[in-house]
Amino acid sequence: MSRKIVSVIMLMFLLSRCIMQTPLETAQPVIEEEDEVIPTEVAEPSSEMPAEPVEELDVFEVPNGMVLIPATEYMMGCDPEHNNGYACPSDELPQHMVSLSTFAIDVYEVTNVQYAECVAADGCSAPIATASQARVDYYENPEYANFPMINVKWDEAMAYCTWAGKRLPTEAEWELAARGANPVAYAWGDDDPDCSQANIYHDPSMSACVGDTVAVGSYPAGASEFGVMDMTGNVWEWVADSYIEDFYSLSPTENPLAEEANQLRTVRGGGWASNWLAARVTSRAYDLSFYSGLDLGFRCAMDGGQ
């Protein structure tokens, strides 16, 4: 056999093997290396990528001259065990649970100089009466600048608080700020009042401690648990609520506010002419909203935020 024929035969043999192997090789499944993880290729997020915005919680900043009262539940109303031996008046009953949101309240009663600033800014009406019990020039005299503003109607008190970015406190807020969460007769506790704790009428001597207003904050011994001053005595204070005699039997639990279409507005805290019974922190009284008097003033409050 010639070398040519052998070569041809050999060539045909080789071609036949290639033809037979090709379908077997292409029929093999394609294995994708999806599961293979190369650590060096797993990169940290690029510092150039924009970060997700972080929502920051608003932090309430207590304004100067105010104190923050935390959200609290307490039994509002008269407790006969902490009432200086008096029977509880019907409008201070029944005791009832109240839940208040955080709020801030003025440490001091609003003063003559503060109110005058509102008048100068056209936020408040000038008082018609400018005298106190014993001082003819009470409102205008710089000597009495830090004495409580008096001779102010309910809507005038509201106007001032609005101008100041605040509001009048509710009855429930006022009482909590005056006494704390535990029942007490007076801002400082259950001890009988005397003229070193509050500017009121002194029952045993049957005479007024002062007989007129005094500068706000003059009785640190009479401060409340929260450090709020003059919650017992000096001047009665307007609050936001209408006066409803039986409101405590109707009161909602959360942030109660008595609102009724009447002219009666609640006042709290007693004044310089108030006896021990009237000066208790649970004592409720009222005046016509258009009334203004020599022993009637106010302080402001505001929502505390979270």
Image (cartoon, helix red, strand yellow):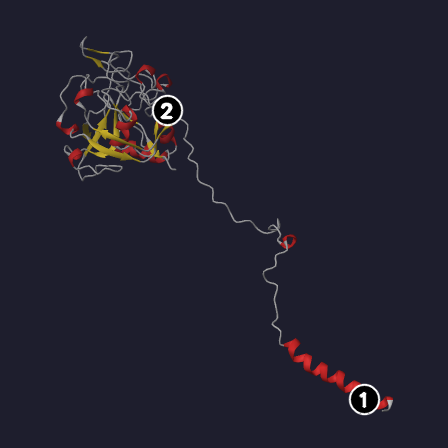
User: Would you say 156 lies left or right of 44 here?
Assistant: left
Which mark identifies residue 8?
A: 1
The correct choice, above or below, for 59 with respect to 28 in the image is above
Q: CA distance from mark 2 to mark 1?
A: 123 Å
| Towards the viewer: 283 or 117 | 283
Locate residue 244: give its quadrant.
top left
* Badge 2 amino acid: Val
Relative vertical location of residue 244 with respect to residue 192 in this rendering, above or below: below
Picture mark count: 2
Q: Kindly identify the residue that appears in the image at 61 percent across and 66 percent down.
A: 32
Residue at the far top: name it. 205
Front: mark 2 or 1 = 1
219 or 128: nearer the eye? 219
Q: Say what amino acid the circle numbered 1 marks.
A: Val
**Badge 2 element:** helix
Around disc 1, counting alpha carbons within 10 Å, would you say few (fewer than 14), some (14 to 19), or many (20 or more)? few
Q: Is residue 177 visible?
A: yes
Left/right placement of residue 32 relative to residue 306 reads right
- Quadrant including the C terminus: top left
**In the picture, residue 139 is in which quadrant?**
top left
Q: Is residue 10 shown above or below 65?
A: below
Q: Nearer the viewer, residue 280 or 161?
A: 280
- Can residue 153 be seen from the camera position used here? no
Give the residue at mark 2: 113
Q: Secondary structure at mark 1?
A: helix
Q: Quadrant of residue 71?
A: top left
Badge 2 crowding class, 10 Å Cα cut-off, few under 14, some 14 to 19, many 20 or more, is some
Location of the N terminus (image quadrant):
bottom right
- Image location of residue 243, percent across then percent down: 18, 33
Q: Are marks 2 and 1 in contact (CB under 8 Å)?
A: no
Q: Residue 255 versus residue 96: which sits nearer the camera?
A: 96
- Residue sitting at the far right: 3
